[in-house]
Amino acid sequence: MTTYPHLLAPLTIGDLTLRNRVVMGSMHTGLEDKLWDMDKLAAYFAERARGEVGLIITGGYAPNKRGWLKPFAAEMTTRLQAMRHQRVTAAVHDEGGAIAMQILHAGRYGYHPLSVSASAKKSPITPFKPSALSTRGVERTATDFAKSVALAKKAGYDAVEIMGSEGYLINQFLAARTNDRTDAWGGTAAKRMRLPVEIVRRSRELVGDGFPIIYRISLLDLVEGGQTWDEVVELAGELEEAGVTVFNTGIGWHEARVPTIITQVPRGAWRSATARLKEVATVPVCASNRISSPEMGEDILASGGADLISMARPLLADAEFVAKAASDRADEINTCIACNQACLDHVFVNKKASCLVNPRAGRETELILLPIRTSRPGRRTLGGTSDAVAAPAAGPSDVPTVAVVGAGPAGLAAAVNAAERGFAVTLFEQAPTLGGQFRLAMQIPGKEDFAETLRYYTRRLDVLDVEVQLSTHATPELLADFDHTIIATGVVPRMPAIDGIDHAKSVSYADVLSGKVTVGRRVAVVGAGGIGVDVSHFLTHDPGDTDEDFYAHWGVGDPALHPGGLTERKPRSTVREVTLVQRKATPIGIGLGKTSGWAHRAVLKQSGVTQISGAAYDRIDDAGLHITVDGEQRLIECDHVVICAGQESVRDLYDAVGGHLIGGADVAAELDAKRAILQATELVAAL
């Protein structure tokens, strides 16, 4: 018996039997593009295979140079490349796993001057205008896809996924928005469908009947001029006849103005679209996007809404996701919080992908948590080699001790990782609860998943027998006998030198988010960094909003009635009148995350937040906040002024005892949990 009988059940697709229904969805990591990163890529996938995921799908590999995502990006075009990939496939197979290669042509999303598309229409997210493929060029592209599929099989891949969603080339051919051709590859819906059908048909001819061909189908384009639901259903039928083995589902183009995977998106937001496809498909269907727990995966499968569950970022966050679920340890899963900060935000600025809550992701060969010599019973080390067990030492006195002061993200990561290595760890926290600034982040609408990180760390502290002393003020005397001292005392809100900063109307963001202060209806927010934007969301959010309101606010409709799944947006309720002010003259929110900042800025606009840049703060008094903008004095009449003007590091203890300084106590630049957790992990790995 298992808690997740459907999720952990095997499934045969073509000639391949998967050990369970969990698919690690495709996500480009940056390790695909260079030959010298091949061993790192193999280790990255092998760790997920060791964690018992059913099927791994790689990042996208172009079928030709015009399909590159960027100059000299990953491609699968030669026998030599296929031979090199045998290192990757062998590493996965050695761990009992299965792996598919994704074949992806970027089309007009290619970040290079060689890009091509169905028509010469520039993408709003890239600087290069594509050339329109000639009729013969389309034919060659279809054949190139098929050759790449055959090469992937030769490389030892167990399956392939053809990328037909997210607004890449195939999707560009399917939508009238990007295909105004009048030849055999455009002009009607049926002709626009020819390219994916030909790709699958030619691929099937080259690899035979049993080799699984997965097709990533766009169910909701979420752009103007997107496909209708009838067209999606017709395409699915044509692809099945051409030889598709499985449908994986895609939601939204990259240029869509609807968020599909970030924290604002409810968990399982798109499961109904997948269930709708399953009703008409005759091959297995895979659900995707914002599915981050085994419970939700099980529920989708048990309800008949899908046959497989795709999770990309959740397998970055925890390589042992499936193994933990299978061994009744789901409460120990390090859950993806959908922040995008270290994964997609990295990829879109040409950096290697990793994970905020698991900085070892993508660094498996570099950031290794080796076991120390200890007399404790051997325990499995999550961050080192498989099943690494600490060697016995002479006696208990030989166990090195570590004191961690502060239980925010940095301190929690340090304590857990040190305990994983075998250190005797004591965690001190002066507050009565764990979490530090993460407890404030959890209060922001759309960031409720941050609570999962605290749940994970709390459980790991218990499992690893870490001594936790809450409501304890650590003193130099208390820390004197520890072998290592890690100071993660965090930050306090910075109160700028504004005349009237001590006025009753003036309150800190920490007091507002913690519930210590309830603000009035009219609010001025001072400081428009990430915290100021979050506080503005918090203050304007209607607590009565439900998951259904998400679709209404973003204009997501029934694709059977609205092509592309777009409809008119429902205005957000005005809960408070908020004015967001910053000193900088730059647009507000410009420094937010590459792949999520636009959505946060959109919510500010939808919520009617007044935004003022280039302001000098004059004073706070009974009337409100007085500012000067472009030499003109202005008054923002308000009930409260919420100060979000940065933080100051808390270093008193470090100044007294020394040791290792990490997290906000080291650098108080905004609230950077990504840097804090990485810094803690790297420090502990080096102890």
Image (tube, rainbow, N blue to C red):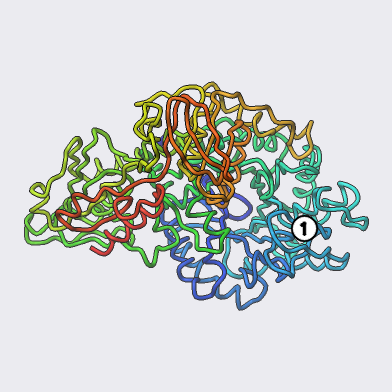
Q: Quadrant of residue 59?
A: bottom right
Question: Measuring 56% from the left and 25% from the top, which residue is drawn there?
Answer: 546
Question: Measuring 46% from the left and 52% from the top, which residue is drawn there?
Answer: 316
Where is 41 relative to 578, above or below?
A: below
Please indicate, yes or no, whether residue 298 appears anywhere in the rendered image.
no
Question: Measuring 61% from the left and 34% from the top, which residue is drawn there?
Answer: 305
Q: Residue furthest bottom?
A: 80
Q: Which residue is mark 1?
A: 122
Where is 474 relative to 138, above or below?
A: above
Indicate the position of residue 482 as horizontal and vertical percent values: 12, 54
Question: Measuring 75% from the left and 52% from the top, which residue is drawn there?
Answer: 171
In this view, the residue in front, 268 or 84, is: 268
Where is 165 relative to 393, above or below?
A: above
In this view, the residue in front, 218 or 678, is: 678
* Secondary element type, mark 1: loop
Residue type indicated by callout 1: Lys
Dot 1, crowdedness within 10 Å: few (<14), some or many (≥20)? some
In this view, the residue in front, 263 or 503, is: 503
Please indicate, yes or no, whether residue 342 appears anywhere in the rendered image.
yes
Indicate the position of residue 79 as horizontal and vertical percent values: 64, 76
Q: Quadrant of residue 369?
A: bottom left
